[in-house]
Amino acid sequence: MRPASKGCWRVSRWIAKLWLALPLAVLPCAHASEPSEADAVPQRDGVVHITQAELLSVSGTGYSAPPKRAEDAALPGDGWKTINLPHTAPRELVPTSSSGARTVTDWYRIDLAGLAPSAQPRLLYLPRWKTLGHIAVYGDGLLLYQSHGSPVHNDYNHPLLLPLNATANTPSPTSVLIRVDRLRNSGSGFSTVWVGDEDSLSWRYQMRQLLQVQLPFMGSAAFLAVGAFAFAVWLRKKRESLYLLFFAISALAFLRTLHYYVGGSYTPISDEWFEWITVASLLWLIVLIHLFLQRLHRQPSAWLTRSALALTLACNVATLPHASTWVVSLYLFTPLLNLMVLPVAVLIFAVNLRKALRAQLPEGRLVAGWTVFAVAFTSYDGFLQNNLVSPESVYTSPYAIIGLFFVFSYILFQRYTDAFAEVGRLNKGLAQRLQAREAELGQSYRRLRAIETQHMLSAERRRLMQDMHDGLGSSLISAIRSVERGTMSDAEVSDVLKGCMDDLKLVIDSMENVDADLLLLLATLRFRLAPRIESAGVALRWEVQPVPVLSWLEPKSALHILRIVQECVANVLRHTRATTICVSTATLDQSVCVAIEDNGAGFDVDEALRRGGRGLRNQQRRALAIGATVSWESGSTGTRFMLWLPLHRKVDADKAIDAF
């Protein structure tokens, strides 16, 4: 057996034990007393338990207010008769009197003349009375108490405790008359009577009040409060229909039990509508419990649901106040309706429980245990409403509602905790999968980093090899061939070798981190080229000004800039016969301009480009690779070379550098 199933089984056994013990606690006086010679049974604590009385029934045509005084000798009727308490008057569904009498006034006479004098005020305790009418109590003919409100909701379920004499050491009445009005076709019930002092009767009254009124009210109120919480949960999780059904069931259960503890003249609606709500809430409660169970075992019965809804709607419409002429009064029809609904409820519960057990639903046993006792308690209350059992008994349906509250709360609690456990398991699984995924991503990242590093090293190696091949290699090959042919002097060979050294130094400088600082890069170039410029007898003017940082400047781009400037200086020294070289910088719009001017012989720029001068073409090609541009302005007074470097370079320029 699964742990959840064992838990449900243990809970159901405890509920079964509680339900078996409950009738013993709440039905201590459910049997009728046998006739005896004495009508008062004295108790050890001084209280008197009265189990016999005299009854006089007087027919009438309607309700009447109790008189201020009532003497037993002045009452009309055919005479008093001795009865045993508790006493029930059966329902007369078929009239037995042809006089047209609709109501009956029952007078119960209790003789207290034989009681010993008491130093304490004496009270009368009536555990239960039930009637469609009112009750009034007289002591020695004087009205001591009368019920208020409507004849239907008249506090019938509240025990009665009232003083017989106002103060101590005053004589208590020798005779008590209790007047009970009732409809002839409704019947009535009257329990045994207790007479004694406050200490002897108050605990009995409090216990009866607790069992009949307070516990049912607290149970239904707690049910409704938890239902309101479930409704709040449903508002956040509207796909969880169980919480909405739980709330609806709690609300209907509260309405269903409301008539057990309300009464007097304080109901805000009429008796007819209040009774209709009581009947309708019972019918809808059965339907919603069916939907709740169906939602649990997930085996819907379409025919049963449609039949239950149709029957409920038909009964609701048929019992609407003033909507039906065949029902004399709904509160007369209610006891019979409750008995008629019972087989339908048994059928609905049996079908759902069979499906729950067949689906091996752990909560099925728990609901099955509650159903057995709920049917038993409801049947018992049906008998009590129809005066077929002792009126001194306690209504047990409210306790079935309390049991429903605990059962459904336990089911939702299990679902709630199971959902949390499932979320915990899912979170744990997700954490494990996330950890494994992170490990895989870490390994992939390390592999990609290694591949990227290898690619960068390979690209840098190819760049250096290509640059050394095109620059240093080409110069060395030319020098070797010239030496072999003997066409170059030692000075010329020295100049070629110095140029090769400059190329090599520029390659090495381009590998250093310049931190996007163009001025640092130009200063490095000045340091490398200044000796060669001075040895050629050319003056160098350095007019470099601060310029913005070029964020894209890195070794690849730096080498292109160095090569462009080097080529420009080499052209000046080789071809122009200049005596001065000026290097300057400036910032214009979104570009940085590096300008190199000389005072040598100028040249025709267009003609040089058209002839395909290698030096000029290389400068243009390298500038294009870094997203820059070059231009020349040449005349008789000298030549001005300008390298325009963008402040922000586009992505295409990066690709051009990689492809260079």
Image: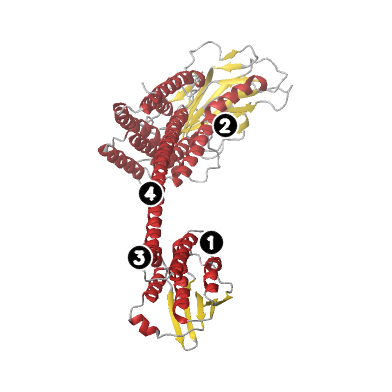
Q: Earlier in the sequence, mark 3 or mark 4?
A: 4
Q: How many marks?
A: 4
**Quarter-of-image position of residue 256:** top left
Q: Which of the two labelled residues, at mark 1 and mark 3, occupies the earlier sequence position?
A: 3
Tell me which amino acid carries mark 1: Asp
Provide the residue designation for mark 4: 451
User: Compared to 139, does 288 lie above or below?
Assistant: below
Instruction: Give the label, 2 or 3, closer to the camera.
Output: 3
Q: Residues within 10 Å of mark 3 (few under 14, many from 20)?
A: few
Could you give the CA–CA distance between mark 2 and mark 1, rounded to whole angstroms?
107 Å
Front position among marks 2 and 1: 1
Q: Which residue is mark 3?
A: 484
Height in image: 145 above or below 496?
Answer: above
The residues tagged by marks 4 and 1 sit, at their Cα atoms, a distance apart of 25 Å
Nearer the N terminus, badge 4 or badge 1? 4
Q: Which secondary structure lies at badge 4?
A: helix
**Residue contact at pointers 2 and 1, CB within 8 angstroms:** no
Question: Which mark is nearer the camera, 3 or 4?
Answer: 3
Q: Which comes sooner in the sequence, label 2 or label 3?
A: 2
Q: Secondary structure at mark 1?
A: loop
Give the amino acid at mark 4. Answer: Ile
The residue that appears at 56% across and 15% down in the rendered structure is 39
Residue depicted at x 57% and y 74%:
544
Q: In the rendered image, is residue 152 in sight?
A: no
Q: CA distance from mark 1 to mark 3?
A: 44 Å
Tell me what residue is drawn at x 58 percent, y 34 percent.
Answer: 146
Question: Type of residue at label 2?
Answer: Ala
**Tag 3: amino acid:** Glu
Q: Residues within 10 Å of mark 2 (few under 14, many from 20)?
A: many
- Residue, disc 2: 136
